[in-house]
């Protein structure tokens, strides 16, 4: 056993209000394995990875590395982030050697080890280059070299390939896997946070799926495929489907919490309509991996759209498939004016936040934006409350249910009947 978490919990605070993100998280990472950590956007994946790395402390529970409690950045672990985070005034080798310098390694040894790591990751000849002279893929290779130069036993990857174009990401994943399988890394295990199901199946030995709110490990899915793995192989596709299915499962609850009633997915009306029309064109029921491929959507882009369609009563998501409801099919096939009317009807019937807001406007005539924001902040963190308010403005305007006045920053009903 290299790394384990026991009963880890974490909540963020806004003033005196806690907003739980993780609760009761238990996991184990063993020598010789790559573990993928999956979950919905905002579901705590990156927070958990930072807790494992010792970058932020848990509120409850503990993390142990080699049997010792992690109470700060742990020697023996390194992390690669989505953003390149290179110092623009330092050369490639100087950026790579920063971790060694922080550990007091002498200059000549720093230079030697940095050059070895740079060569290992495929950047020989670029040691003296500045970041501005590198492509995005090359910059991320520098990030990998910076992590690998300290010879970590556990390498943590936080969406490390997601900022790259698909071809570059595939090449870097392949090179990393070749180094891993060829025994050229001193790293004993990797933990990979990703929103890309194909990436998880291509690299990992098993996937841990964060579910619920606050999140915990809800599913563990083995990925027992030999390398190299062919994305066109039926077993590969079946595992991708299983991961999608796990991510669309919901916990059964007896009542909806107030914060759940106030949350709205980040989804523009135009994108929702386009997705509904795509579903209708494909027959009304579609496998989620196929839908993501058809629409060129990543999981973090697709799931908020699906949540919005479900919330509005236009679609159902189950067992890795999405199906338009009769109302959703009618909405996708209606004229633009009919679509607006149907959207308004479903907002008032299906979305409690809109029903409450519309009723308050009927009673008071005008509501200051700040008052609504403060009400949302009673149950949601401020950034989430502001995002929800932005969705309210867009959806309400499209549906013709409300008008937003920029000057007084207030909502009112339209002049004519809604």
Image (cartoon, helix red, strand yellow):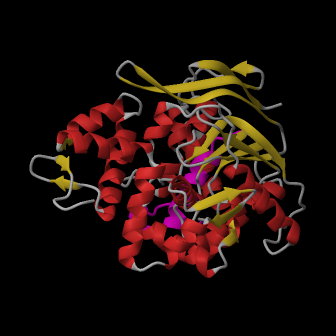
Q: Residue at x 83, y 57 (%)?
A: 181
Most foreground residue, 243 or 50: 243
Residue 135 seen in this snapshot: no
Horizontal side of residue 328 vs 368, given as left or right: right
Expressed as whole percent of the image width and height from the top left, the position of residue 297 reads 56, 68
Position of residue 249 relative to residue 176, above or below, is: above
Spot the residue most to the front. 417
Expressed as whole percent of the image width and height from the top left, the position of residue 154 reads 71, 39
| Magenta residues, start to end | 124-152
Most foreground residue, 326 or 93: 326
Position of residue 73 relative to residue 147, above or below, is: above
Expressed as whole percent of the image width and height from the top left, the position of residue 35 reads 76, 46
Horizontal side of residue 15 vs 37, given as left or right: left
Q: Which quarter of the image is occupied by the N terminus?
A: top right
Spot the residue most to the left. 407
Q: Which quarter of the image is occupied by the C terminus?
A: bottom left
């Amino acid at each position: 056993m290299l790394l384990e978490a026991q009963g880890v919990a974490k909540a963020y605070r806004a003033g005196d209000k806690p907003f739980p993100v993780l609760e009761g998280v238990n996991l184990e990472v063993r020598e010789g394995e790559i573990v993928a950590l999956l979950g919905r956007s905002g579901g705590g994946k990156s927070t958990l990875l930072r807790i494992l790395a010792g970058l932020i402390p848990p509120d409850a529970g503990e993390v142990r590395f080699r049997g010792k409690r992690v109470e700060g950045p742990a020697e023996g672990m390194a992390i690669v982030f989505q953003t390149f985070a290179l110092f623009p005034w330092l050369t490639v080798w100087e950026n790579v050697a920063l971790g060694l310098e922080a550990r007091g390694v002498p200059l000549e040894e720093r230079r030697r080890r940095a050059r070895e790591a740079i060569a290992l990751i495929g950047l020989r000849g670029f040691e003296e280059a500045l970041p501005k002279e590198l492509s995005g893929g090359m910059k991320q290779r520098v990030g990998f070299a910076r992590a690998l130069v300290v010879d970590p036993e556990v390498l943590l990857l936080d969406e490390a390939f997601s900022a790259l174009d698909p071809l570059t990401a595939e090449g870097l994943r392949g090179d990393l896997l070749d180094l891993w399988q060829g025994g050229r890394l001193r790293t004993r295990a990797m933990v990979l946070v990703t929103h890309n199901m194909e990436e998880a199946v291509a690299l990992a030995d098993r996937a841990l799926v964060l579910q619920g709110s606050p999140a915990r490990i809800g599913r563990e899915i083995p990925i027992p495929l030999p390398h190299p793995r062919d994305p066109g192989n039926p077993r590969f596709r079946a595992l991708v489907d299983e991961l999608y299915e796990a991510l669309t499962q919901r916990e059964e609850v007896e009542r909806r919490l107030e914060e759940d009633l106030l949350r709205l997915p980040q989804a523009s009306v135009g994108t929702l309509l386009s997705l509904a029309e795509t579903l209708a064109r494909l027959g009304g029921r579609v496998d989620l991996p196929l839908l993501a491929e058809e629409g060129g959507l990543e999981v973090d882009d697709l799931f908020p759209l699906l949540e919005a369609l479900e919330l509005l009563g236009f679609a159902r998501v189950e067992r890795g498939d999405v199906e338009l409801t009769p109302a959703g099919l009618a909405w996708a096939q209606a004229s633009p004016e009919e679509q607006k009317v149907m959207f308004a009807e479903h907002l008032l019937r299906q979305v409690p936040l809109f029903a409450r807001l519309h009723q308050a406007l009927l009673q008071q005539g005008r509501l200051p934006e700040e008052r609504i924001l403060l009400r949302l902040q009673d149950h949601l963190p401020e950034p989430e409350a502001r995002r929800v308010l932005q969705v309210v403005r867009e959806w309400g305007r499209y549906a013709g249910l409300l008008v937003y006045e920029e000057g007084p920053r207030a909502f009112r009903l339209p002049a004519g009947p809604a």
